[in-house]
Amino acid sequence: MVATESNRALAVLAFALLSLAFLAPRGAAAILEPVDVGWDRYFRLDWKVSTRHGQPVVNGYLSNTSPYPVTQIRLLVDALSPTGEIVGQKISWVVGSDLGPFSRVYFEVPAPSDASSTYRVRVFSFDRVEIGQKH
């Protein structure tokens, strides 16, 4: 009987600790950075901020400046404070992102929900297609 009470006490303690872990306040969310920090060797972005249905959107063209086909392209849009700090982020797939060498594709991404008049757009991730590789 002592072993059962001991097990029950451990179970209650474990439950209490887990509950506290889930109720504890969370720290600031981690800032996302591009997966390939050298993305700008392969791509050029030409974009602007406009409005669609009363909401800000970032739209423009992503150009593949490399001799390689790329696929699975995701963009990272940062909302910046007046001091340049990131106050919001959004990752979005580029529709039709099978992009041949030296070609471009149009994109449109809803801007992060944090009110900002300043944005930054970067390539978050992509897959380079090697010759002979099926994608």
Image (cartoon, rainbow, N blue to C red):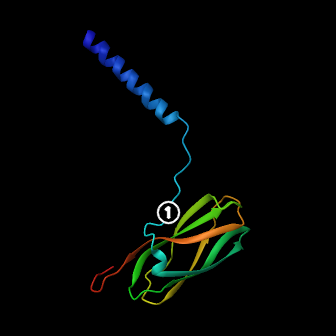
Read off the residue under disc 1: 33
Q: Is residue 106 above or below residue 116?
A: below
Residue at (34, 18) in percent of width and height:
8
In front here: 53 or 6? 6
Q: Is residue 106 above or below residue 76?
A: below
* Neighbours of disc 1 within 10 Å: few (<14), some (14-19), many (20+): few
Task: Please provide percent x and percent y for residue 74.
Answer: 48, 71
Residue at (54, 41) in percent of width and height:
26
In front here: 53 or 75? 75
Amino acid at the residue labelled 1 = Glu
Task: Say what secondary structure mark 1 lies in.
Answer: loop
Q: Where on the picture, by quarter, is residue 133?
A: bottom left
Residue at (51, 75) in percent of width and height:
94
Looking at the image, residue 35 sits to the left or right of residue 26; the answer is left
Residue at (34, 21) in percent of width and height:
10
Task: Please provide percent x and percent y for residue 69.
Answer: 39, 85
- Number of callouts: 1
In front here: 120 or 132? 120
Task: Please provide percent x and percent y for residue 124.
Answer: 48, 69
Looking at the image, residue 114 sits to the left or right of residue 14; the answer is right
Outermost right residue: 54
Q: Where on the picture, by quarter, is residue 111?
A: bottom right
Quarter the C terminus occupies: bottom left
